[in-house]
Amino acid sequence: MGTYVLPDLPYDYAALEPAITGQILELHHAKHHAAYVKGANDTLEQIAEARDKDQITPTSLVGLEKTFAFNLSGHVLHSIFWQNLSPDGGDRPDGALADAIDEHFGGFEQFKKQLTVATASVQGSGWGVLAWEPLGKRLIVEQVYDHHGNVGQGSTPLLVFDAWEHAYYLQYKNVRPDYVTKLWDLINWEDVTARYTAATRA
């Protein structure tokens, strides 16, 4: 059975300074993301063991499925997050993605404000997400609570902003909006554009 693996970052831990300190990035990647990977793998093993022993019950399965979804979704979103960021990022997209943002949000500044507010105001722990919604064939901004609250929308994440406290608290304390503002200087639009192209062709 395949297992999930913590991906290497495409840059050094200190590469995103001063927006994100090397200390925060190392803790975030090597501790928090690694914990989601381990959690997903461990839970898969527990489900397989329960299945092999014919111990799958409504009570046990509900808890295991929820734990698996939490950890796997955390792994997926963090894997996107690292690729969405770059020490050479910032500015704004061009081409088809820029046109789609204009069409679905009325312009880049309107989109930027919506994603910023969505990320800064998500209740508790969660994410602000730019996603492609295939049914309506449009870009949407979502607030994802914890890691896995929007599965029913069937959308594909393109750009994700981590709003969990472990992503910023050591540096920005409780001022989440300042952290979100700094993320815009790190966006790897080449990666976001590639995800948009793949999602719209699927």
Image (spheres, grey):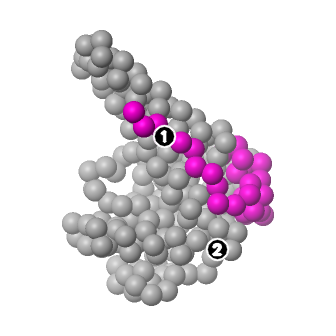
Q: Mark 1: which amino acid? A: Tyr
Whether residue 113 can be seen here = no
Q: Which mark is residue 153?
A: none
Residue 89 on the magenta span? no
Residue at the (35%, 23%) spot, across then down: 48
Q: Mark 2: which amino acid? A: Gly
Residue at the (40%, 72%) spot, across then down: 196
> How far across and how far down the image is residue 114, in percent?
46, 70
Residue 180 position by quadrant: bottom right
Quick check: 109 above or below 116? below
Please give the range of residues in magenta.
Answer: 1-28
Whether residue 183 can be seen here = yes
Instruction: Say whether residue 139 is left or right of residue 191.
Output: left
- At label 1, counting other C-alpha atoms closer than 10 Å, the crowd grade (few under 14, some 14-19, many 20 or more) is some
Residue 132 position by quadrant: bottom left
The tag earlier along the polypeptide, 2 or 1, is 1
> How far across and how far down the image is residue 200, in percent?
31, 73
Quick check: 107 above or below 171? below
How far separated are the C-alphas under marks 2 and 1? 28 Å
Camera-near label (2 vs 1) is: 1
Which element carries disc 2, helix, strand or loop? loop
Q: Which mark is residue 89?
A: 2
Residue situated in front as seen by the camera: 65 or 145: 65
Quick check: 31 above or below 82? above
Q: Which mark is residue 4?
A: 1
Residue at the (65%, 38%) spot, across then down: 31
